Image: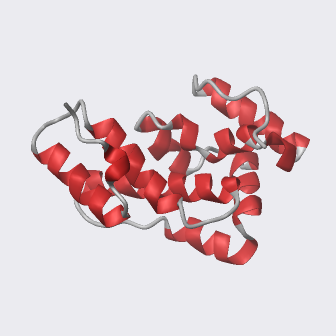
Amino acid sequence: MAYDVFKLATAEDARAYLNNVRRLGRTDLYPSAFRRLCELEGKDHGDALVVDFWRAVAAAEQVLREQRGKTVRLARTRQKVERVGVHKTVEDLALSKKPSDGFAILTGAGLGDLTAEYLVLKYQGRFSAEALAAAKVRLVEAHIHFPTEAAA
């Protein structure tokens, strides 16, 4: 029987568990351990959109950490959030002419449901019609199924 990842209470515990899962070659346990790490990284924020955004950042940074063997931060994304906030950052990412590096990282890892474009559609009542249209186009082009109804 697999370990219940919901018993992991901190990001540090989740990262250690994830490392053990990878070290032991337990590919069956890896997806749930990875998702739990992302949940824990995003949990300290009140707004659901903000929580999901920081989960996405954690996921992208973890993918890069595993690819490069060292801690990597999405510095430009973090700086933009400091300047304009999460909502504006997500909208701008969806409206950009080209997919962001984060989009490529997340979709390449099979995590299309964590992209800014996906978040725009998940929380569609909070974004402009232009951002919704752009997000839909980008997700369709990437063959990512997206929510058709807005989250609360």
Where, by quadrant of the figure, is residue 132 drawn?
Answer: top right
| Rendered residue at 36%/55% (across/down) | 62
Marker count (numbered): 0
Residue 25 picture location, percent across and down: 13, 37
Instruction: Using the rendered image of the protein, determine whether residue 82 is visible from the camera's viewpoint.
Output: yes
Q: Residue 81 appears in which quarter of the rendering?
A: bottom right
Coordinates of residue 116 in the picture (x, y in percent): 64, 47
Q: Is residue 144 left or right of residue 21?
A: right
- 97 is higher (above) or lower (below) than 133: below
- Location of residue 119 in the rendering, given as x and y in whole percent from the top left corner: 68, 44
Q: Residue at x 58, y 28 (%)?
A: 142
The residue located at (45%, 45%) in the rendering is 105
Nearer to us in this view, 79 or 33: 33
Please say whether residue 63 is visible from this viewpoint: no
Q: What residue occupies the far right of the structure in this picture?
A: 129
Nearer to me, 37 or 141: 37
The scheme the figure's colours follow is secondary structure
In the rendered view, tell whether residue 91 sits above or below residue 84. Answer: above
Q: Locate the C terminus by quadrant.
A: top right
Quarter of the N terminus within the rendering? top left
Q: Which residue sits furthest left? A: 24
In this view, 4 is above or below 88: above
Residue 100 pos. (x, y %)? 58, 50
Q: Residue at x 44, y 33 (%)?
A: 110
Location of residue 15 (image quadrant): bottom left
